[in-house]
Image (cartoon, rainbow, N blue to C red):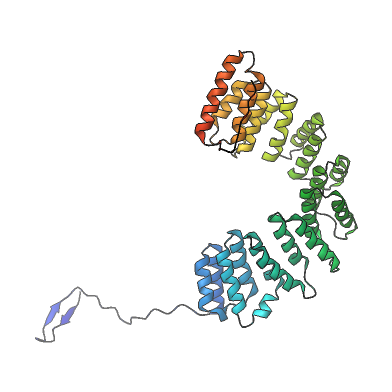
């Protein structure tokens, strides 16, 4: 504590004020472009899009790096934020060197993807057409437009983009092949798919795993099982999706024993499985009443760290019910946290067909009525749904 001097009496007055010498004023935030870019990247990574865009709007001349805008657009795409994406696009258009920035093919691809993901296909198409007017447009721009159509279920338009790409003497790569094959599989356009397959074979790049899986899916969807086996056997590497396509192919060919053998082979080779694998295998167990195999799958589900979804639980309940083990099926059904209409129909159909094992049909009818009352109370049944039960 130091003494303060009274102006009136010239005497010292005690005070608790602490004197701090050489006070320095706080420096304003640095306007260094490098620091601003680092701040922008940090805001973008943390998902604070409003602050990131405001930073650009406050000093637009400081942000001329295409990579900065690319990262920001990527964040808008992942959040499907059309509002933020439009603001970023506006800033790109208002830049002094906007033409140079918008010549960047990566930015064009990101903008096409952004508007496609947000359902603004007309805007995406405008950017795409402006891009392909110039020569040397890379595959990524074409594929971005094709994927945009595909994700919005305009599958024929996606294929037309691929054809247009070929018409412009662009050599397709694996990225384009997988996109075209997916559209062919969804449309069941076998002959077009075969044409794309021929281009894959002739390509100097060599198909990657995504392309091979797309071929498997195409031939599985079109029920060309010989081609499924041929593609599968020629694949240098296989993942779970590859094995799932083979199992699905056997299932569609009604070769149920072979499908189960493939699943067992997956386990022996340590490939693992996905919920899609089990959702495909369990109906096979139900059809051939392979209760032991179904129980083994149930054990694997219980041991898994992941929580099973409704589709998988429906398949498991269906397997137990069709194998005549109603107690297990009912226990699973009652323990499901969420149920859809299929869940209820599975139990109702099981009781209706099997009349609850050896018990009398009167008791089965009582259980069905009880389930119907619970179904109506659950809210799963809408007025547009009608259930016809045969007892």
Q: Is residue 249 left or right of residue 8?
A: right
Please identify the residue farthest to the left as the structure is shown. Answer: 9
Identify which residue, 326 or 268, lies in the foreground: 326
Residue 242's image quarter? top right
Residue 247 versus residue 173 in the image, above or below: above
Residue 309 versus residue 175 in the image, above or below: above
Relative image position of residue 321 (x, y in whole percent): 65, 24
Identify which residue, 61 or 86, lies in the foreground: 86
Total number of numbered labels? 0
Q: Is residue 263 left or right of residue 4?
A: right
Residue 244 versus residue 27 in the image, above or below: above
Q: Is residue 274 visible?
A: no
Q: Is residue 210 left or right of residue 377?
A: right
Q: Going 74% across and 44% down the picture, which residue do you hit?
A: 241
Q: Is residue 202 visible?
A: yes
Residue 282 versus residue 212 in the image, above or below: above
Relative image position of residue 248 (x, y in whole percent): 77, 38
The quadrant of the picture occupied by the N terminus is bottom left
Q: Going 75% across and 55% down the picture, which residue do you hit?
A: 155
Relative image position of residue 235 (x, y in whole percent): 84, 47
Q: Going 85% across and 66% down the picture, which residue do you hit?
A: 167
């Amino acid at each position: 504590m130091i003494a303060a001097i009274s102006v009136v009496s010239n005497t010292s007055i005690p005070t608790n004020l602490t004197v701090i010498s050489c006070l320095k004023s706080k420096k304003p935030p640095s306007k260094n472009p490098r620091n601003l870019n680092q701040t922008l990247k940090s805001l973008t990574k943390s998902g604070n899009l409003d602050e990131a865009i405001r930073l650009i709007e406050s000093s637009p001349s400081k942000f001329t790096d295409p990579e900065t805008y690319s990262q920001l657009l990527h964040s808008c795409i992942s959040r499907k934020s059309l509002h933020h994406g439009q603001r970023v696009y506006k800033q790109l258009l208002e830049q002094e060197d906007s033409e140079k920035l918008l010549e960047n093919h990566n930015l064009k691809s990101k903008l096409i993807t952004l508007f496609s993901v947000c359902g603004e296909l007309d805007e995406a198409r405008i950017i795409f057409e402006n891009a392909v007017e110039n020569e040397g447009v890379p595959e990524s721009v074409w594929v971005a437009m094709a994927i945009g159509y595909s994700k919005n279920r305009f599958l024929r338009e996606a294929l037309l983009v691929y054809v247009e790409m070929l018409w412009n003497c662009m050599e397709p790569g694996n990225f384009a092949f997988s996109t075209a094959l997916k559209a062919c599989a969804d449309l069941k356009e076998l002959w077009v798919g075969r044409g794309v397959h021929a281009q894959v074979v002739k390509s100097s790049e060599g198909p990657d795993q995504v392309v091979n899986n797309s071929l498997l899916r195409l031939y599985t969807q079109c029920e060309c099982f010989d081609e499924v086996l041929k593609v599968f056997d020629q694949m240098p590497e296989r993942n779970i999706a590859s094995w799932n396509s083979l199992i699905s192919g056997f299932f569609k060919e009604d070769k149920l024993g072979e499908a189960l053998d493939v699943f067992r082979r997956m386990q022996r080779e340590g490939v693992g499985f996905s919920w899609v694998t089990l959702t495909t295998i369990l109906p096979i167990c139900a059809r051939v009443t392979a209760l032991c195999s179904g129980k083994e799958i149930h054990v694997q589900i219980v041991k898994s760290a992941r929580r099973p979804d409704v589709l998988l639980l429906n398949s498991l309940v269906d397997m137990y019910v069709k194998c005549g083990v109603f107690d297990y099926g009912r226990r699973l059904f009652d323990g499901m946290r969420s149920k859809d209409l299929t869940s209820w129909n599975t139990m109702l159909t099981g009781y209706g067909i099997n009349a609850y094992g050896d018990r009398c049909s009167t008791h089965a009818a009582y259980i069905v009525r009880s389930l119907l009352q619970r179904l109506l109370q659950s809210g799963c049944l809408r007025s547009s749904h009608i259930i016809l039960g045969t007892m």
